[in-house]
């Protein structure tokens, strides 16, 4: 895959955020552009300026792991950024491996596991941020996302950037947008042949300035654990802890199990119980006239 432009932009944005003082180099006069110069990165990485310039132009396929590691140290890349650069290098190398496909389903046993979780909200998104699967409480938690999809494929990114209700649903909406774009950037580096993700990026870049500006930043993130605050339209504020675990046998498809829980005895735990009761009442509601079978 020719991903030279992606490599160029990623390395250039990482270089631009550093100053000579941050990396122990003397400042050398006024700079036309922010950040380190290429020759300074080359010095820090222990390579020639010509070699680093060639690397930043996207010629990464033949670079050894040791040299990539030296560049990562020079640019002060974090774990997610190092992993992303490794993914970009891997994608640039010739391979006869079959192209990856974006999964829209989970194995039955995964759905059984989800359904067995009754006190936690559980979802399975893919690299395109589609909600591939969920348990009842997960569907209830993300009910605005499902409503925005109107019976189509529920997608977290599309909801966040295109539905005005997302500003109220996410207690810190700008941070939620940045997190989603960073996850998508990470997925794009890992799975460059994912047509669904490429199409979604094109759609959102066309329709949302908020998305375009964040996508241009080339930020990436590993999203394993943390906290999120939602303001649900039915039960109000929910301060949730989450754990995200890649599904081992589905790693090529980018599926991740994410489980949200509330601290026992907290208002959020009570809110989740109320949300579960609301979800059950929705499932038990009688069919509306347009849902009734034809006779």
Image: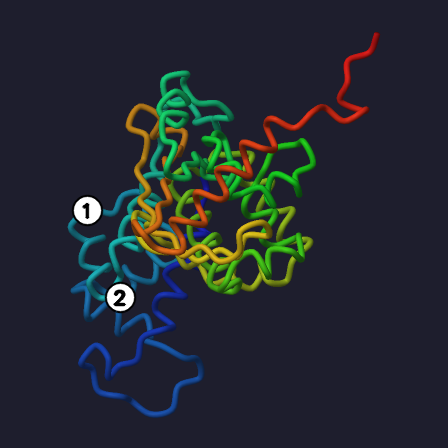
Residues tagged 1 and 2 counted as in contact (Cβ below 8 A):
no
Residue 112, given in percent of the width and then of the height, sits at 39, 20
Q: CA distance from mark 1 to mark 2?
A: 15 Å
- Depth check: 207 or 57 in front? 207
* Residue 8 placement (x, y as % from top left): 42, 57
Which of these two is toward me, 216 or 270?
A: 270
User: Residue at coordinates 53% horizontally, 43% vertically from top-left?
Assistant: 142
Residue 275 sits above or below residue 6 on the image: above
Note whether residue 139 is visible: yes
Instruction: Locate residue 38: give its quadrant.
Output: bottom left
SS state under label 2: loop
Please, what secondary structure does the residue beneath circle 1 have?
Answer: helix
What percent of the width, then of the height, locates residue 191? 42, 37
Q: Earlier in the sequence, mark 1 or mark 2?
A: 1
State which quadrant residue 166 falls in: bottom right
Q: Which residue is mark 2?
A: 75
- The circle on residue 65 is 1
């Amino acid at each position: 895959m020719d991903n030279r432009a992606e490599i160029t932009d990623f390395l250039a944005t990482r270089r631009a955020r550093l100053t000579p003082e941050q990396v122990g180099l003397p400042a050398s006069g006024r700079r036309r552009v922010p950040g380190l110069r290429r020759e300074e990165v080359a010095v820090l990485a222990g390579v020639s300026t010509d070699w680093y310039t060639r690397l930043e132009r996207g010629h990464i396929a033949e670079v050894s792991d040791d040299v990539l590691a030296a560049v990562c140290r020079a640019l002060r890349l974090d774990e997610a950024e190092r992993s992303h650069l490794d993914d970009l290098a891997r994608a640039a190398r010739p391979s006869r491996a079959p192209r990856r496909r974006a999964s829209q389903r989970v194995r039955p046993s995964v759905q059984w596991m989800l359904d067995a979780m009754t006190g936690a909200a559980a979802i399975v998104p893919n690299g395109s941020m589609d909600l591939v699967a969920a348990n009842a409480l997960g569907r209830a938690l993300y009910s605005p996302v499902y409503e925005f999809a109107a019976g189509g494929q529920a997608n977290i990114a599309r909801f966040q950037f295109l539905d005005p209700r997302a500003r109220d649903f996410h207690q810190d909406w700008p941070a939620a947008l940045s997190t989603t774009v960073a996850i998508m950037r990470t997925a794009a580096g890992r799975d460059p042949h994912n047509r669904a993700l490429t199409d979604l990026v094109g759609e959102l870049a066309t329709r949302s300035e908020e998305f375009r500006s964040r996508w241009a930043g080339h930020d990436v993130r590993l999203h394993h654990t943390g906290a999120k605050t939602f303001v649900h339209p039915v039960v109000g504020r929910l301060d949730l802890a989450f754990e995200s675990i890649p599904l081992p046998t589905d790693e090529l498809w980018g599926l991740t199990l994410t489980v949200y829980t509330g601290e026992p005895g907290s208002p959020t735990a009570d809110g989740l119980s109320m949300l579960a009761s609301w979800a059950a009442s929705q499932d038990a509601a009688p069919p509306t006239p347009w849902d009734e079978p034809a006779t």
